[in-house]
Image (cartoon, rainbow, N blue to C red):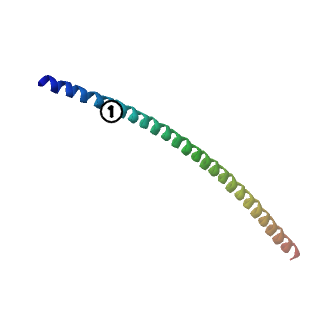
Amino acid sequence: MPTAKKKTAAKAAKPVGVAMAAGQETFETAIQAGAEAFKGYEDFVGYGKDSVDAVMKSNALFVKGFLDINQAFFGLAQAYLDNSVTAEDSRL
């Protein structure tokens, strides 16, 4: 009788081994797919970072240009006031 149990156990172990091998293969495939998806996510985030960097640089250039225009405008306003005061002083 012990021999019959060993044969039955051996027969049962074979499908279990096949199932475990298939499960291992499925697990490895899932891990590989997850790694590829994560790489895709990293690429996507990298594109987003590049876009944000470009927007920040263009915004900095816009602000600098705006400040330059304001300085020029206030310089002209100051020159106009100086000329007005000079003209008023010469009339007195």
> Neighbour class for label 1 at 10 Å: few (<14), some, many (≥20)?
few
Q: Residue at x 23, y 25 (%)?
A: 10
Seen in the picture, residue 86 relative to 67 is either above or below; the reply is below
Query: Quick one: quadrant of the C terminus?
Result: bottom right
Q: Residue 72, image x and y in percent?
A: 76, 59
Which residue is identified by label 1? 19
* Residue in the foreground of this view, choosing between 42 and 51: 42
Q: Position of residue 59 (x, y in %)?
A: 65, 54
Q: Would you say 4 lies left or right of 87 here?
A: left
Q: Please give left or right for residue 66 compared with residue 29 in the image.
A: right
Residue 16 falls left or right of residue 82: left
Question: Which amino acid type corresponds to the residue marked 1 in the rendered image?
Answer: Ala
The furthest residue to the bottom: 92
* 67 vs 52, nearest the viewer: 52
Q: Residue at x 88, y 75 (%)?
A: 91
Q: Residue furthest left?
A: 1
